[in-house]
Amino acid sequence: MSATDKDMMAAPRILCISFSDIEADSRVLRQVRLLAEAGEVTTLCYGNRPPGATHHLEVDSALPSLPQTPAGVLKLALRRFAAVELSAPALKQARELVGDRTFDLVVANEARALPLAHAVAHGAPVWGDMHEWAPEERAHVLPWRLLVKPYMYSICAKYLPRTTAVTAVNASIASLYTEQFGCRTEVVRNAGPFRDLEPSPPAPGRIRLVHSGAAVPGRNLEGTIEAVKALDDRFTLDLYLVKARDGGRYWQQLKDLTAGDPRITFHDAVTPEELPATLNRYDVGVFSLPPQTTNHRLMLPNKFFDFVQARLALVFSPSPETAKLMQEHDLGVITEDFSNAALTRAVASLTNADVERYKANTHRAARALSSAEDESVTRAVLARLLG
């Protein structure tokens, strides 16, 4: 076989960029697994090499992925966005790690990775998996709203029209990208793979609530804890929270908020792969998030799909994307509004018979709400970009 023939048979080289902790990012982990079906994957991210990656370029987790240096903040304030696109400490190291490597496809997870993806693509197609609505990722925090939101909007306006494929987590957010930046945006939800589980049997006289996710401010975890503290002794709450990059300080603040309530238990986080089976021992997955940002208002989070695969009944706040699926499949109770009191009332209204019925409904809906549909979209994108 000639060298030319061998080159033709070589697997496509794919670079996957993410500035999340990839070991805890179930969306990116699923993405890497599908990328590995299509070629040889190099991951460029925080954390250890994930399954499916052939090569791994590890970014120092202490380095921020936004221009948070004094000079960077000043340039953001002066709206000198072009001057900071590649100046964040993590992006500078990431570019050095890539070096002179070349790829047949570059995948950028979230807007902050777009400038780097285009800088290292050298003409290869770029797939921008935007996840949620980038300009308002943390717009409930004043510095973000004043400094980072305009920067994120600038990145999207500059790079998305030249990005070969764009995806987002749901139809509402995909429409925003299409309307505001003129890019065709496809939907890849945060659904996980189908899990062959059965609803767990009820505990007599008890309703076991559970919540999983990241222990970061802005998720209304304080509200969930306060709402549960107002319930009677039939209810318990177990929390599986991934500690933030603050050394676990916020996680500890939440734990202190329980004031030793024996009905509320904090557990170590488990891997995304283990999560549905771990949650399966409970009855009701709870989440209420006031719509402080567009992402909050239009949320369709990982935990919704995790709760379904765990065969739990659901109690969620009235966000349109989650409410639509809950009503379509009769999965649980949607709160009247976003207040702690409304969450307390919604949970308190549940009987054991209600819980059993909703758990049976999530069992019936689990295959439809798995990642099969989303994997088809991803494979079609890869076939188009690598074909």
Image (tube, rainbow, N blue to C red):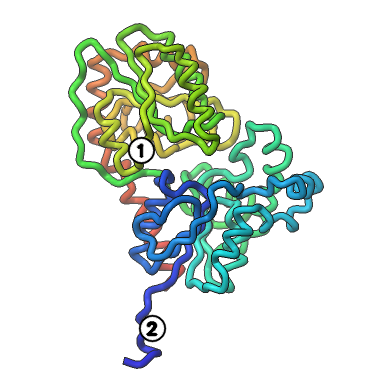
Q: CA distance from mark 2 to mark 1?
A: 40 Å
Measuring from the top left, give residue 188's x and y in whole percent.
Answer: 43, 50
In the figure, is residue 33 to the left or right of 132?
A: left
Which structural element holds mark 2?
Answer: helix
Assess disc 1: are there few (<14), some (14-19) or many (≥20) residues with their C-alpha within 10 Å of its C-alpha. many
| Picture layout, residue 336 above or below residue 100 | above
Which structural element holds mark 1?
Answer: helix
| Picture layout, residue 230 above or below residue 140 | above
Q: Quadrant of residue 281?
A: top left
Instruction: Please tell me the numbered disc located at residue 305.
Output: 1
Residue at 53 percent across and 27 percent down: it is 250
In the rendered view of the protein, which quadrant contains the C terminus?
bottom left
Closer to the camera in the image, 329 or 314: 314
Residue at 35 percent across and 41 percent down: it is 271
| Picture layout, residue 206 above or below residue 93 | above
Q: Which residue is mark 2?
A: 8
Measuring from the top left, give residue 316's x and y in whole percent.
Answer: 42, 25
